Amino acid sequence: MNAEIICIGTELLLGHIVNTNTSFLSQKLAEAGIDVYHHIAVGDNHARLIAAFRQALSRADIVITSGGLGPTVDDITIETLASLIGRKLILNKMLLKDVKEYFISKKIKFPKESIRQAYIPEGVKWVHNNVGTAPGIIAEYADKVIICLPGPPREIEPMFVKELVPYLKKRLAANWVIKSRTIKIAGSAESQVDGKVRDLLNLKPPTTVGIYAKLGQVDLKIMSKARSDRKANIAISKIERKIRARFKDHIFGCDDETLEGAVGEILTAKKKTIAFAESCTGGLVSNRITNVGGSSRYFKMAVVAYSNTIKENILGVSWALLTKYGAVSRQVALEMAKGIKFLACVDIAVSVTGIAGPTGATKYKPVGLVYVALVTGKKQIVKEFRFKGSREEVKFQASQVALDLIRRNI
């Protein structure tokens, strides 16, 4: 059984809204063992939406739409559905009561426009919306299923998980499941990762591996389709062991795990404390570290030393070093780390200094040049990096390598 997703709204085509619904729906359908072969976005136009419906029904067992269920005249999904399946729109009194109760609960006068949301094609099922007023619609038509969902993610997500996934699982002729696991790698370029897993990337279904390059990391996603969770997990684990053997400490986590979370776990386990001295990253490393619950156990303080005066007066970097080597240098990065370690009385100190751009470069120091230093009771490490990208991208990559340097050395 396969599905196609149609996202409706001219605002999607204009780029005014980022379409996250396709990602969410595809993930949940895969978990239910339903393949998704096509995504499409279409504007608020009756003729084009009818054409999209017909094309989807010609190649999919299940068609799922999001958007176009609101009370305004440009919300045309229900009218188009009724036209497609040849059924008239009728006022559903139970649905009207449901919509009215929403406004009563909010102590808002019922707007007359919202009565449109209680008109649905004759014979279809509707699903209660716990967050908004637009119902979900289930139409069983010519051995196919059409499901119409609201557009806002906060409405579509709980509705789909609670109501639609159980419904779809009941319709499955075979008990297939699709499971996945994402292995996250830092410190290696996409080409380096690709070279080590070329054989795995060529695997054919039911178990496959995909490579996805992200800013500062590379993900390897293993997917397996099987008759049970157990069989799928066994197939995934077999491939995961091969990947881990090839990349070892380059792997920092999997699935929802983050690099800052991995660092936090190690610091907690080792009972170590840490502090940061940041220049070009503007506190980004510290921000990421403190995004992890319980970080107060190991994170003690940070200094954002954006000016040379602060580097000298707070962190104790000598003016002679700043003048001779410049703020963006190995020497200054190391002194910044030493300074924050002394100031915070911590086990581990990390500093970051660099040129995030787009200005500030010199003949010998280009935009993207970054130095990261780590100092412990026994180690003094300074690494040089040269990043490409926008100011924000350089800052993020700098924070990524700083966190990875900590992870590898503690």
Image (cartoon, rainbow, N blue to C red):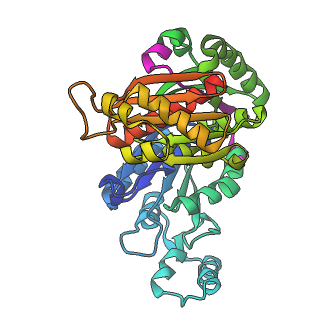
Check the picture and name the quadrant holding the C terminus.
top right
Q: Nearer the viewer, residue 404 or 143?
A: 404
Q: Quadrant of the N terminus?
A: top right
Q: Is residue 190 located in the magenta-colored stretch of the structure?
A: yes
Query: For the magenta stretch, what is the residue range?
Result: 170-194
- Residue closest to the eye, 215 or 220: 215
Q: Is residue 212 left or right of residue 247?
A: left
Residue drawn at 29 percent across, 33 percent down = 367
Q: Is residue 327 visible?
A: no
| Residue farthest to the left, as pictured | 363
x then y, percent, for residue 300? 65, 47
Asked if 404 appears above or below 70 in the picture, the reply is above
Note whether 340 is above or below 208 in the view shown.
below
Residue 385 vs residue 65, the one in the foreground: 385
Q: Residue furthest bottom?
A: 109
From the top left corner, tell me how far across and down residue 157 is, in percent. Answer: 60, 56
Identify whether 189 is placed above or below 123: above
Question: Residue 308's quadrant in the figure?
Answer: top left
161, 60: nearer the viewer: 161
**Up/down of 160 relative to 409, above or below:** below
Residue 352: x and y in percent read 46, 35
Q: Is residue 118 visible?
A: yes
Quarter-wise, where is residue 134 in the image?
bottom right
Q: Residue at x 50, y 16 (%)?
A: 193
Q: Is residue 164 within the magenta segment?
A: no
Q: Residue at x 75, y 21 (%)?
A: 234
